Image: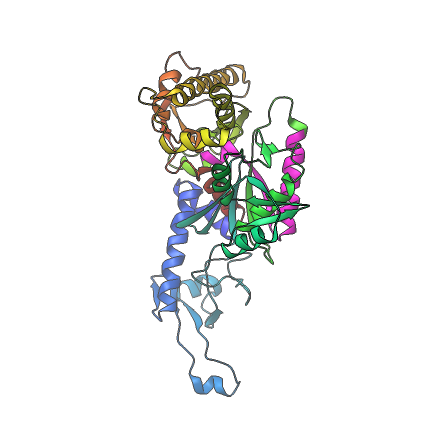
Amino acid sequence: MTKKELIQQVSLKTGFSEALVMKALASVLNSWTEALVAGDSIRLHDFGSFSSPLLSHQAEESKNTLPRQLVRFRPSGKLSRLIAGTQEVKETIIENINESTGGHMTDMPNSESHNPGQEADFFGLDVGTSRIVLASGEFNNVKTQTQLNAFVTVPYSKFTENILRQNKITYQMSGKEILIFGNESEKFANSFNVEARRPMYNGLLNPSEVNGWQIIQSIIELLVKKTKGPDILCFSVPGAPRGGEANLVYHEGMLKNFLEALGYRAKSVNEGLSVVFAEMEKDNFTGIGISCGGGMCNVCFAFMSVPVFSFSISKAGDYIDNAVAAVTSEVATRIRVIKEDSLDLSRNPKDKYESAMHIYYEEMILTLVETLRTEISESRNLPRLDRAIPIVLSGGTAKPKGFLEKFEKIFRQNDFPIKISEVRMASEPLTATARGCYIAAAYES
């Protein structure tokens, strides 16, 4: 029996969701690991006991090795009789117990497995137009790291290159130019009042950027290290834009091939569905997940984790930035900074920049809501719902104060084809997609 099969069985017998069972199992295994590492024993009535006696130095010195910790399992009398009738069951010695129990439950990881306390062997990666986010760590303590998916170019000089090295700024050479990428790119773009360039456009690889794919690989490698594997990594892909299905296939294939070259078992997850995974465990993974990113707004309606439909619209963060820049004679990078640092959609705009942002935000939300309404009305495969379902918003474009209230006001203006229980913001809007991909990878482990 594998860990995944165990989780499925417990979920089936108890009625709890698999995600909840997975969390409980992770907590139990973590507690056991800490106890065994500390030298304590674990006694389970009618099952057996685990103990971790430390072998003596004298016994090991004869082998010229350091002492090592063993874990012994002694089955209870009841378990022994169940397994082998009245025949005595010999004590089983289990070495290097940890929570990564691939294969059969009696199979133990080899010497190259993760040790207790090390990060799990599954990862979630949000490959967004604006940011690339990695989710990793223990299941009960997920950590995220972020890099801007952007770059700027400056003329090459040996002096400039040395300054970049001294300040540990990530860059690449391209002919007579230096390409500064990742988080440092925004600082340079603002300092020189130029537009940061994007390796992706409208949620997909940007064909007009000659260095785009090279830069994306370099940014991903800042977050994702090579592995001897087979670690599992789930990465986000947008919903297919109408007329752009072929471009999505290419985008997904390039990312999958690159991540597999780094040693991972890579699998794509729809961006809207990943929001459902991250935020709707208590709703039995049923609801509408919306990720408002830089290049696209991605939407997925899922029923018990199964996607019913998904779609994307290109009116998103970049659309707002470029439109506002065009009508205010400002560069989009500066507009983006204003939007992310001080925009408050719940108050009246204080200048021409905020006035334009309010207008384009409202247009974006109207388009999103009406497209969602149309998709539901025209869908032929809607499940029968016995209760109202939630809508969860996420993404950097949804982050400004007042976005949730503005969305809900527009949403409530007209009747909706299905009952919605609430519209809420993700607990961590900027990392919801990566965390959802992480949960998807955990289920694949």
Q: Write the residue at 55% across / 47% down.
A: 233
- Using the rendered image of the protein, determine whether residue 395 is visible from the camera's viewpoint: no
In the orientation shown, which residue stands out farthest toward the left? 347
Magenta span contains residue 206: no
- Across and down, in percent, residue 402 comes to 34, 25
- Across and down, in percent, residue 334 comes to 46, 31
Q: Eyeballing the image, is 95 above or below 378?
A: below
Q: Write the residue at 43% across / 70% down.
A: 71
Query: In this orientation, which residue lies closer to the viewer: 39 or 260?
Result: 260
Q: Eyeballing the image, is 443 above or below 305?
A: below
Q: Eyeballing the image, is 133 above or below 296?
A: below
In the image: residue 214, left or right of residue 91: right
Total numbered circles: 0
Q: Write the residue at 45% across / 79% down.
A: 67
Q: Write the residue at 42% across / 22% down.
A: 357
Magenta span contains residue 271: yes
- Using the rendered image of the protein, determine whether residue 124 is visible from the camera's viewpoint: yes
- Across and down, in percent, residue 275 comes to 46, 34
Place residue 398 in its image quadrant: top left
Query: In this orientation, which residue lies closer to the viewer: 275 or 131?
Result: 131
- Across and down, in percent, residue 114 comes to 50, 61
Colour basis: rainbow
Query: In this orientation, which residue lies closer to the viewer: 26 or 45?
Result: 26
Secondary structure mainly formed by the magenta segment? helix
Question: Magenta region: which residues?
Answer: 247-276
In the orientation shown, which residue stands out farthest toward the top? 414
In the image: residue 263, left or right of residue 375: right
Query: In this orientation, which residue lies closer to the viewer: 160 or 438?
Result: 160
In the image: residue 197, left or right of residue 145: right
In the image: residue 242, left or right of residue 18: right
